[in-house]
Each structure stands twice: as C-alpha cells, then as structure tokens.
Image: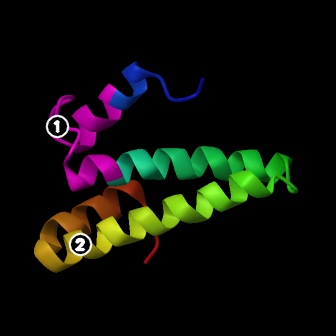
Amino acid sequence: MYLTNEVKAEIFAKHGGKAENTGSAEGQIALFTFRISHLTEHLKKNRHDYNTERSLVLLVGKRRSLLDYLKKKEINRYREIIKELNIRK
C-alpha cells in the first residue's frame, strides 16, 4: 500500500506540527495533496479507471474547501502551505 501509517505520521509531523496533530488544516491539505499526486499518476497509466477519477475529483474538492477555510481564517498560514506544497492558485 502506498500510504502507510509511517508515511502519514511523517506528513503530519512535517506540516501539522507533530505526528499526533492529525486535525490541523495544513496536515490534512498535505495528506490530500500526497493522495492527489498518487491518483494522478495512476490515472496517467489507467485512463479508463472512472472510479479513481471520481475519487480524485472528490479529493480535490475537499482540499479546495480546506484551502478556502484556511484563506478565510488565517491568510499567512494559507500562503505558507501553498508555497510549501507548490499548489497552483
């Protein structure tokens, strides 16, 4: 499996402050970004996998809503996470 507990803990430690802080918006955005990049690579090889395509669209929507929330609440944290993850806006 591509997303083990160790990988999740590493993502949350890097972006969420510490590995146990799984509820932070930055950590969740980073996790969604990791999953989106994995699904994008999968879809490049398997163009007709429509279930994965739907999952990808849902993940992008979730990440977008979290980014909108962060932008509305704390613009500096929003700018940091956008720059750190190289997310286009």
Q: Nearer the viewer, residue 22 or 11?
A: 22
Q: Amino acid at mark 1?
A: Asn
Question: Quarter of the image containing the N terminus?
Answer: top right
Whether tag 2 and tag 1 are in contact, CB under 8 A, the answer is no
Q: Nearer the viewer, residue 44 or 48?
A: 48
- Residue at numbered disc 1: 21
Q: Residue at x 25, y 44 (%)?
A: 15
**Quarter of the rendering containing residue 65:** bottom left
Callout 1: SS = loop
In-image side of 9 versus 1 (left or right) = left
Label 1 packing within 10 angstroms: few (<14), some (14-19), many (20+): some
- Whether residue 87 appears in this view of the structure is no
Q: Residue at x 33, y 55 (%)?
A: 84
**Quarter of the rendering containing residue 66:** bottom left
Question: Quarter of the image containing the C terminus?
Answer: bottom left
Q: Residue at x 79, y 52 (%)?
A: 44
Give coordinates of residue 49: x percent, y percent: 82, 52
| Residue 5: image tag | none
**Quarter of the rendering containing residue 20:** top left
Label 2 packing within 10 angstroms: few (<14), some (14-19), many (20+): some
**Magenta residues (range):** 9-28
- Whether residue 59 appears in this view of the structure is yes
Give coordinates of residue 81: x percent, y percent: 28, 59
- Residue at numbered disc 2: 69
